[in-house]
Amino acid sequence: MSEQKVARVGCGSAYDGDRLDWSVDLAKSGAVSYLSFDCLAEGTMTAAQLRRNEDPSVGYAMNLLPVIESFEAFLGNGLKIIGNFGVSNTEAAVQATVDLLRQLGRYGIRVGAVHGDDIRTKAFELDLDLPDMGCKLSEVGKPVVSVNAYTGAGEMMSLLTGGADFVLGGRTADVSLYVAPICYEMGWDLDDLDRLARASAAGHLLECGILVSGGRLANPPRHMLKNAVRIGMPYAEISHDEIIISKNPNSGGVVDIRTVKMQLGYEIHDPANYLTPDVTLDVSNAAVEQVDVDRVRVTGVRGKPRPDTLKVLVGLDLGWRVTSEVSLGGPGCLERADFARELLEARCAEFRGDIDDLRVDLIGMNSLFGDQIKAGAPAEVRLRFAARCSERHVAAAFHHEAKHLGMSIAGATASAPRLERFFGVTPAFVPRSAVSLEQELVTV
Amino acid sequence: MKLYDIAYSRAGDKGDIANVSVFVDDEADWPTIRDRLTVEEVRKKFGPLVKGEIVRYEFPNLHGLNFVLYRALDGGCGSGLRLDQYGKAYSSLMLDIDL
């Protein structure tokens, strides 16, 4: 069995700003030859583009330089790193990576990059349909901040084949960050659908980091998690006939059939048709089996041809958001919350019509589920206001009134309201021909 | 009996769409949720929180279900003002369903 080829790929991070100490533990354990870092949630790209608009030298992952500093000792010493660190500025990310590796004296390390997922110009030429908005891009009525296509594993695989030790992309799909090293290591072709599906399923299981090794499992008293203090980052062993999911040895957390099932179902809609840029993944007949402590075997995943289109996320500038909270407790706290809400509305009467959307919640009563779980009279409530305003001066006026509200109500205790930029994302789809990717390989 | 007593659940989001998966602890309870945890039950529990369609999928080998809740996150583009912007807590509402 020792002859059998196995790709050992671990999770480095699940989002930009994820903690790195636990993935350093995994690198130190020697269990993996590749670490993949997902740096992007749906909104991350738009936030990064807003930063780049103000300073053209930024817009890459906040985690990029900390990752290099934390992992440089392993780079080129049995570990390769793959990540969508470029976020909205892959060019600046390459420059920053090379500069830092030079400073660290790591000459000879090869840095690969995939450019071209930013398709703002093309998106306007095509005037993309925005199905969730029910309109065309040109009709959206809000400033378009970013348009990025989810890209696949192919270019990253080529860069690994070319000798890259550190590979970065822009909006590389989460799963593809794993498909690239797995297929590269195993020598699998991207048109071998069932193998591609296996690589993609492993990526899907790893891309949320500790969520497959015990994160979000703890639900006392029903489900207890022993040793959640230092949860082990997960990795997969992929061979010609199976996927094994495991985690850093000598760590907390757990990999069992519960954690694997929940991650398999995570953010999947139709389990028979999970669309990725590389393959349409069918996990509807997947099966899991605990083969040892913290080792789960996953079988039964199938592949179908990849979609003809690539998914795109369009980031829209929605203006400003103000959030404000006031706590009220003891007898009559709900009545005082009603009074506070009415008072704030009355004080905002002059510009109320200019607030795009205003939401009022009672934390402790209805903020998560509306009235869908009925509660008795609470000992205390936290009144929350959230307002969205296209114009900054309207947001500032609301912020001003929210800030001073507590002074007019008995026993109210408030925290400083927040005023921040607010943006949203909405999906679209483009033909693959609309996205032309370029590879770059630089030796430090 | 609540779903909480026999199952575990996790929620995820894509834009304005939430998905909530549910798996039973004990395989013997699989027929119970397969037969009784219907779209109608979920619709009743979530009420006005879900403004669009609810679609149910089965994981027969994993003994679980996946519910996809359209227009469930208070924003055409993942940009609502909800405290729970990504619907992470929907897994707990799901487990509150009486079977």
Image (cartoon, helix red, strand yellow):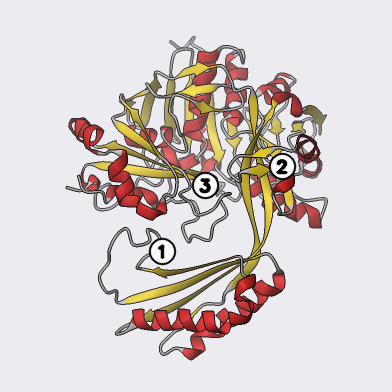
What is the quadrant of the C terminus of chain A in the image? top right
Residue type, mark 1 in image: Ser
Residue A72, how many percent across, how many down?
68, 39
The tag earlier along the polypeptide, 2 or 1, is 2
Q: Where is A237 relative to A90, above or below?
A: above
Q: Nearer the viewer, mark 3 or mark 1?
A: 3
Q: For numbered disc 1, what is the local secondary structure?
A: loop
Disc 1 crowd, CA 10 A, few/some/many (<14, 14-19, 20+):
some
Toward the viewer: A183 or A250?
Answer: A183
Q: Quadrant of the N terminus of chain A?
A: top left
Q: Quadrant of residue A193?
A: top right
The residue marked by circle 2 belongs to what chain?
A: A
Q: Which residue is mark 3?
A: B16
Is residue A349 visible to the viewer in this orientation of the structure? yes
Q: Is residue A224 at least partly visible in the picture? A: no
On residue A367, the disc is 1
- Disc 3: CA contacts within 10 A as few (<14), some (14-19) or many (>=20): many
Q: Nearer the viewer, residue A288 or A353?
A: A353
Q: What kind of element bears circle 2?
A: strand
Residue A147 numbered tag: 2
